[in-house]
Image (cartoon, rainbow, N blue to C red):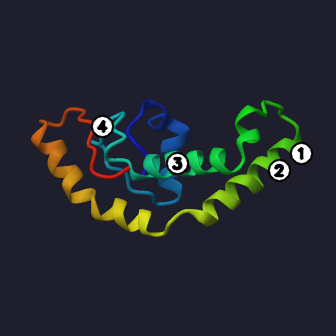
Amino acid sequence: MQDNASIYRVYTVQAWFALYGITQITNWPAYFPDLNLIKHIWWHLKTRTYEMFPEVAVDKSETEHARQRLESCIQAAWDTLDKGLFNNLYASMPARMKAYIAAGGWHKNIKIIQ
């Protein structure tokens, strides 16, 4: 799932979605992190990576070695994420949708689970 940001509505992206049979929710908000569970997972992954490997946060080099190091650090951090996080985020979706509807479809920072 992606949000409905304009970058996903360009022709090449739409053609790719069609080619691979990816169904889109067309009335999804353009930016709504409360409903995009992947954004929450990315936040946890980034936080864990920087906690475990603080040097990665300051390394701005763009060498292949730096890319490989970052990839291995992210993989190591991913392996430590509590799998209950995914279940909890998924289980929170009905409450997130209700809050979105109650807010009249407007952005509402839902603090159900971080």
Look at discs 4 and 2 and give the one toward the viewer.
2
Pinpoint residue 70: horizontal percent, then vertical percent.
76, 47
User: Which image quadrant for residue 47?
Assistant: top right
Label 1 and label 3: CA atoms lie apart by: 23 Å
Pointer 1 residue:
65
Say few, some or many: other residues with alpha carbon within 10 Å of mark 1 (under 14 / 14 to 19 / 20 or more).
few
- Tell me the amino acid under the disc marked 4: Pro
- Tell me the amino acid under the disc marked 2: Gln
Q: Are marks 2 and 1 in contact (CB under 8 Å)?
A: yes
Label 2 and label 1: CA atoms lie apart by: 5 Å
Relative depth, front residue between 1 and 100: 100
Pointer 3 residue:
42
**Residue 68 bears which disc, if any?**
2
Label 3 and label 2: CA atoms lie apart by: 19 Å
Q: Are marks 1 and 3 in contact (CB under 8 Å)?
A: no
- Mark 1 and mark 3 lie on one chain; the one further toward the N terminus is 3
- Tell me the amino acid under the disc marked 1: His
